[in-house]
Amino acid sequence: MLRVLMFLVPLALSVYAFIDCISTKDADIRHMPKPLWAVLVLLFPLVGSISWIVAGKKRQPAGSSPWQGGGGRRQWVAPDDNPDFLKSLEKDDEKDGDKD
């Protein structure tokens, strides 16, 4: 079983690194052009894969995503700090005042 893992782990790492390399935008690649990284990963599977993962791609900080711009969820605001909620309370008070 250990012999199989010694073969499968580097193979899986190489496949992951190669697919990640070819699917990464050119603007997000560091140090070398994309074709050179792909050749490095294919010719030197273990060293090339590890070097791609460590130094080849600009990484996002944890918790951030490229979709945080427009259309994303807004940050939660407590009801007593939310101006829309406070306006709705004032409208409800006015409606209740008219009924009395």
Image (cartoon, rainbow, N blue to C red):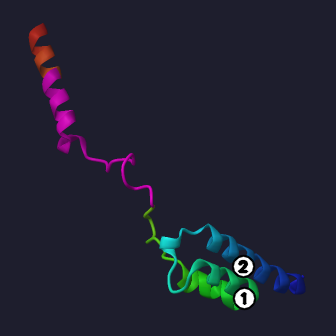
78 left or right of 58 in image: left
Relative image position of residue 32 (x, y in whole percent):
55, 85
- Is residue 56 shown above or below 22? below
Q: Residues in magenta? A: 66-91
Q: Which residue is mark 1?
A: 46
Q: Inspect the magenta stretch and tell me whether residue 76 lies in it.
A: yes
Q: CA distance from mark 1 to mark 2?
A: 8 Å
Residue in the picture at 45% in, 61% down: 65
Quarter occupied by residue 61: bottom left
Q: In which quadrant is the N terminus drawn?
A: bottom right
- Is residue 80 shown above or below 92? below
- Point out which mark residue 84 bears: none
Residue in the picture at 75% in, 88% down: 43
Where disc 1 sits, the SS reads helix
Residue 100 appearing in the image: no
Q: Inspect the magenta stretch and tell me whether residue 74 lies in it.
A: yes
Q: Which residue is mark 2?
A: 13
Quarter occupied by residue 100: top left
Relative image position of residue 37 (x, y in whole percent):
63, 83
Q: Which residue is outermost to the top?
A: 99
Residue in the picture at 17% in, 21% down: 92
Residue 56 appearing in the image: yes
Which one is earlier in the sequence, the residue at label 1 or at label 2? 2
Where disc 2 sits, the SS reads helix
